[in-house]
Amino acid sequence: MDIYFSDLDRTQVYQLPILPTDMPELSKSTKNEEFESYQDGVYNVIGNVELTTFPIDCWLPEYAGKYNWAKSQINPYLLINLWNNAMITKKPLKCVMSRGQNKNNISSEILNWSVTIEDMNWYPEKNGDIKYKIDCKEYRSPLILTSSQLSTLSSAVNSVSETISKLNLKLFGNSL
């Protein structure tokens, strides 16, 4: 398995040098609501699915080259700063998790998402290595319409509104 983090334009791409013991647990839930009626008991109203979250809890070598068996040789503060700056600048990062070649013919890519860093903790251990924990959340960018798209949408809404008015006039006459 490999885990990579990068900024969205991929000018900074970093592979985690040390992987967590276990694959990060992906967590997803829904926003269901329960309502109790007077006679019929409790009803569960199904809500929208929330965004997927996952923690990564591991450590980084104190400096590049400290462990020749590490998956990558980088300054640990490049990753710490990438995560920290993403939080400060309110920008998502790209996270890619790959399982590599496998005998089951399953896609090698586990996830390739834009994520936000929701929480981050780190500290140097006695041996100088950096212990860290980050909480990531799937990021979906809001739909942003161009002025051309807004104009088209506005024309369509006006056309539908005119059609409804004409239908109402035919059906109900001037009684509305």
Image: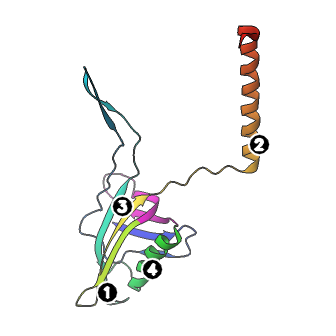
Please identify, in this view, whether the residue under mark 4 or under mark 3 is nearer the observer. 4
Q: Which comes sooner in the sequence, label 4 or label 1?
A: 1
Residue nearer the viewer, 13 or 91 = 91
Residue nearer the viewer, 71 or 8 = 8
Q: Position of residue 115 (x, y in %)?
A: 45, 61
- The residue identified by callout 2 is 151
Please identify, in this view, whether the residue under mark 2 or under mark 3 is nearer the observer. 2
Question: Residue, x 32% and y 58% (percent of image)?
Answer: 102
Which quadrant: the N terminus? bottom left
- The residue identified by callout 4 is 81
Q: Amino acid at mark 3?
A: Gln
- The residue identified by callout 3 is 101
Residue numbers of the magenta segment: 91-117
Q: Quadrant of residue 132?
A: bottom left
Which quadrant: the C terminus? top right
Point out which mark residue 68 bears.
1
